[in-house]
């Protein structure tokens, strides 16, 4: 049985308002993610933190809220409302994976430099994306230790608690995250292109 947690509880400090409720073509941003998730996960196994329940002060606390209200399942996927272009196929791939920790990732394209001025070989690094999926019981038990209250990524929790390294799926150009208000122009453009590609595929072009 699959479960899904959609994170839609952020304050949107960099966006200057709660971006998860921004309207994109007559639909709130978080609803794009929900409408894709519900095609793979039964509605009673989807928790939208920030809509169904109040979120925590940090991302980690919101994930824990979601886990606490999610019915027991075998695998859980963590999605972000700020990445509205996730596809049904991507959600399915994560949930159908046998890996206890699996994430989308992309190679870095920019030069990587530390704050101390040290340069790093970008070929040794990935840019981790969401959504990500996990063994439900392992992730829930890790959070119940109370050791993880302000992490930015659940693959980090799984690694710190169990030594489990994430399995990478190397794709996700569409998993653009809306962070700043200026990103709305980008997401609107990407949505129109995605819809066109889906229509062309449906029509057999």
Image (cartoon, rainbow, N blue to C red):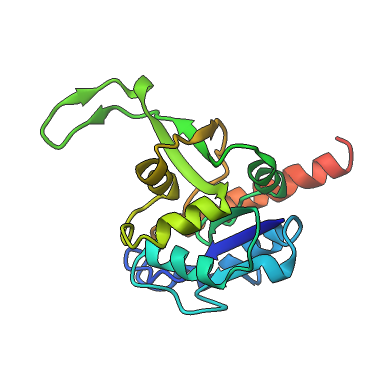
Quadrant into which the C terminus falls = top right
Farthest left residue in view: 116
Left or right of residue 36, residue 174 in this image = left
User: At which x and y percent is residue 191?
Assistant: 63, 52
Q: Nearer the viewer, residue 182 or 15?
A: 15
User: At which x and y percent is residue 106?
Assistant: 48, 32
Residue 88 visible in the shown view: yes
Quadrant into which the N terminus falls = bottom right
Count how many numbered circles sit on residues in the image: 0
Is 162 located above or below residue 84 in the figure?
above
Kindly identify the residue that appears in the image at 46 percent across and 79 percent down. Answer: 54
Quadrant housing residue 98: top right
Is 9 located above or below residue 41 in the figure?
below
Is 36 located above or below residue 190 in the figure?
below
Left or right of residue 84, residue 185 in this image = left
Left or right of residue 155, residue 95 in this image = right
Q: Nearer the viewer, residue 162 or 126?
A: 162
Kindly identify the residue that appears in the image at 66 percent across and 52 percent down. Answer: 192
User: At which x and y percent is residue 87?
Assistant: 67, 48
User: At which x and y percent is residue 126?
Assistant: 41, 31
Is 81 located above or below residue 27 in the figure?
above
Kindly identify the residue that appears in the image at 59 percent across and 53 percent down. Answer: 77
Q: Nearer the viewer, residue 100 or 178?
A: 100
């Amino acid at each position: 049985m699959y479960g899904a947690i959609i994170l839609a509880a952020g304050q949107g400090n960099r966006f200057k308002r709660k971006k998860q409720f921004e309207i994109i073509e007559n639909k709130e941003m978080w609803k794009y993610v929900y409408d894709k998730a519900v095609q793979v996960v039964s509605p009673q196994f989807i928790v939208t933190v920030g809509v169904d329940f109040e979120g925590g002060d940090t991302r980690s606390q919101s994930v824990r809220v979601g886990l606490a209200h999610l019915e027991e399942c075998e695998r859980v996927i963590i999605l972000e409302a700020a990445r509205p272009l996730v596809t049904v196929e991507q959600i399915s791939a994560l949930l159908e994976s046998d890996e206890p920790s699996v994430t989308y990732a992309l190679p870095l394209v920019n030069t990587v430099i530390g704050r101390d001025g040290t340069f790093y070989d970008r070929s040794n690094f990935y840019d981790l994306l969401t959504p990500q999926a996990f063994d439900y019981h392992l992730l829930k038990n890790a959070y119940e230790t109370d050791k993880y209250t302000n992490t930015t990524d659940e693959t980090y929790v799984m690694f710190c608690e169990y030594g489990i390294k994430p399995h990478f799926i190397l794709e996700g150009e569409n998993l653009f995250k809306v962070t700043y208000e200026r990103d709305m122009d980008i997401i609107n453009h990407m949505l129109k292109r995605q819809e066109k590609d889906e229509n062309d595929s449906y029509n057999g072009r």
